Image (cartoon, rainbow, N blue to C red):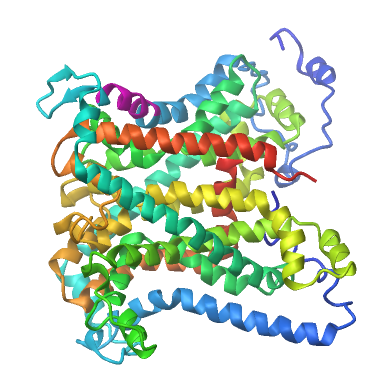
Amino acid sequence: MTSETSPRRHAERLAIDRSVVPPHLARRPGGPFALHRGRGRVTTLVRPVLGYLLVLPSLAVFVIFFYLPAALLFALAFYHWNVFGTTTFRGFGNFAVLFNQPLYWQSLLTTAYFVVVMMPLTTLVALALALLLREGVRQARGGLARSLIFLPHVTPIIATSIIWAWIFNPQFGLANFVFSHLGLPRLGWLEDPAWSMPAVMLYTLWHSVGLYTVLFLAGLLVIPEQVVEAARVDGARGFALFRRVIWPLLSPTTFLVLILVSVNTMQAFSQIFALTGGAVGRGGGPAYSTSTDAVLIYQTAFTYQHFSLAATMSLILFVILLAITIVQKKLSSRWVFYR
Amino acid sequence: MRPPDSNTHGAPAPGDARSATGHSRRLTGSGRRLISVLIGVGFVLPVYWLLVIATGARGDAYAIPPVLLPGLRLGALLYVLSHTHIVHYFLNSVFITGATIALVLTTGVLAGWGLAGYHYRGREVLFLVVVGAMLLPQQALIVTQFNVMFHLHLLDSYAGLILPFAASSASVFLFRQAFLQLPKSFWDVARLEGANVFQYLWRVAVPMARPAVATTILLTFISSWNQFQWPLIMTSSKAVQPIELALSHYMSSFSNNWRDLTAAAVIALAPVLVVFIFTQRYMVRAVIGEDRGVTE
């Protein structure tokens, strides 16, 4: 690709097939690629460095706003840093302070409670919905139901938390109205430390299950129909068909969904902030019952200005989440079902 | 991976129409469909109730039994529009979202071609760095991101709400995939005709990658319009704050005025609903494509 080569020889050497033309350029006067007529010079910009340069804007964003903060986590967790800009090395001192905080352990327990409930709950509901929608989607008629179930996932969390705060209102909310008609006790929901977390879970389920349903649907649709049909011919019906044929073939998707639910649940923040205290309480209430790890990190850093402590908590969360993601990637490359 | 409705234009799946018990199965099929639509309606009921209360009479929020039909009164909407600064917050969101989309498209196209069009040492590593950014757990970075923003003097500014999201791994990934599929001869011919790389991208490559453009716009629109935690932490003045933050301010100041509060929520929700109604199929595909792309 030297500049001495004439365009014609260059074209011959590259064996360019000029009959392959982008359709939207095919009818341009002067030929499909007549972008620079009259200039007659072959641009020989092609140097590898251009590749780097084109990636640079994206790379800069990722490095400055994502990789650098990730690296800073390690630095900050081992230092004491305050708003006046003075830093002192503390070794594992921040960890020691943190592990002596009962509130931190409580937040880990709350997070674990959240994750342990959400993983099976979300997965089962999403799987049930996907199985229900499956035939319809195959035949182009399940589109409406699928869209309706998916819609909550794209709604802004604060906007829809407002209506859920009303639904959960103990006096006139919909939840207690339904409960009392079903003969169930009326609950305090977001105002009761025992029921605030279940209320957050219900909102989270509503907001996210559509995503996982659609993931399961995609997983169901790549199961070859011949396999299911062969099992039917062999007499498999109903639950046996599901248990022996569909469930094993679906396992990569199930695994993916379980991981995504756990990672997303550990990072849930906005709905807790909005539903349990709003801008005044800064989330986490009542009586710290919804103070998950993510909420506590936010409060430690931005309410109490304990940046080093917050960074230490973040580092622990970072390592846990990254480990889950890496394990998932390693395992899924072994599990993913190729045809 | 195949999109979920790639099958939808084909013939009915075998085993349904030609099954011996075709008649009874079709009946259970329509029963299933009814149940699934009913469940779907259940899922959008909260959004419906938002409209009911926002357009209802004063005090409808406290009615027992609950009011079932929207009152179609626009009083609360007009009150919120005229007596609060919601229009200002709304326009902030429009500006932030628009600028983010434009930047994400630009950086995505450039990086996509930078990773697809050239061979150079370290290209694969560069690709992993770009895509790997998506795997970093956002919630664990927020504290140190605040430090970085502080030192770059980006706190409480439009730039601070836009620049960190000016590139997206998903967008780079999508454009790279799209550009890898283009025949090499397009690029060779364009170069012979004297086009530089930007002309090639603008006139040839991007028009051929329309699905990637559409997906990037949808994903960025949703994540940018819905962003809450980032502006909550990175901004303090009304001048630059987006609408989700306004809603959270109103949640504390309007505390018991459910009608005005829900009216404000409807205003924040409306653009998402409108876009969703017109692009639902695309959007479902875009979002699950992103999530599977990250993890597979």
Instruction: Say which quarter of the image contains residue B116.
Output: top right
As displayed, is residue A195 above or below residue A266?
below
User: Foreground residue, B34 or B213?
Assistant: B34
Where B261 falls versus A157 (above or below)? Answer: below
In the image: residue A75, left or right of residue B13 = left
The spot of residue B213 in percent (x, y) is 56, 47
Residue B163 is at least partly visible in this image: no
* Above or below: residue A25 compared with residue A5: below
Tell me what residue is drawn at x 27 percent, y 48 percent.
A107
Labels in figure, total: 0
Name the residue at the left extreme: A84
**Residue at image x 15%, y 44%?**
A303
Q: Does the magenta stretch include residue A91?
A: no
Query: How far across and down, in percent of the image, does residue A148 sit?
Result: 52, 72
Q: Which of A103 and A84 is in front in this view?
A: A103
Q: Which residue is drawn at 76% across and 57% down?
A: A223
The image position of residue A285, as x and y in percent, is 20, 59
Residue at the limit of the structure toward the bottom, as seen here:
B65
Observer-nearest of A320 and A26: A320
Q: Residue at x 31, y 25 (%)?
A: A72
What predominant SS class does the magenta segment belong to? helix
Does the image show residue A330? yes
Q: Where is residue B143 in the image (x, y as percent from the top left)?
A: 26, 36
Q: Is residue A70 magenta?
A: yes
Q: Does residue B255 appear to the left or right of A258 in the view shown?
A: left
* Residue B9 quadrant: bottom right
Q: Foreground: A94 or B257?
A: A94
**Horizontal arrangement in the rendering, residue A115 relative to residue B19 (left or right):** left
Q: Give the range drawn in magenta.
A: A67-76
Query: Which corner quadrant holds the C terminus of chain B?
Result: top right
Tell me: residue B84, above or below residue A331.
below
